[in-house]
Image (cartoon, grey):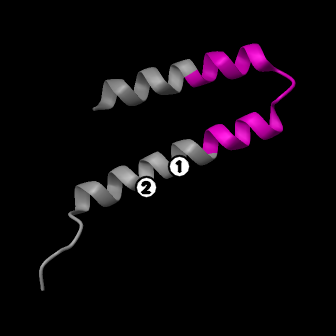
Amino acid sequence: MPQIFPMNWIILSLIMIMTITLTVMNIYFFNFSTKDMKKMTNKVNYEFSYKF
């Protein structure tokens, strides 16, 4: 039985979904602190691009 999606794509999609949900939660729950939000998003984006 051939694999339609390799494991790497599944892991990448899971990581992307987790990061998107985390950013959405941060935007909804910590909307009052926009400066900290920008710092956190920049840090997350930097670490995410550094991994790949």
- Dividing the picture into quadrants, the one containing residue 6 is bottom left
> Regarding mark 2 in the picture, which secondary structure is present there?
helix
Crowding at mark 1 (Cα within 10 Å: few <14, some 14-19, many 20+): few
Query: In the rendered view of the protein, which quadrant contains the N terminus?
Result: bottom left
Disc number placed over residue 18 in the picture, else none: 1
Query: Residue 44's spot in the image, x, y percent?
Result: 51, 27
Query: In the rendered view of the protein, which quadrant contains the C terminus?
Result: top left
Magenta stretch encompasses residue 33: yes
- Dividing the picture into quadrants, the one containing residue 50 is top left
Crowding at mark 2 (Cα within 10 Å: few <14, some 14-19, many 20+): few
Q: Residue at x 81, y 31 (%)?
A: 30
Residue bounds of the magenta highlight: 22-41
Q: Are marks 2 and 1 in contact (CB under 8 Å)?
A: yes
For this orientation, the residue located farthest to the left is: 2
Mark 2, residue position: 14
Given the image, on which type of amino acid does mark 1 rest? Met
Given the image, on which type of amino acid does mark 2 rest? Leu
**Where 51 sits versus 3, above or below?**
above
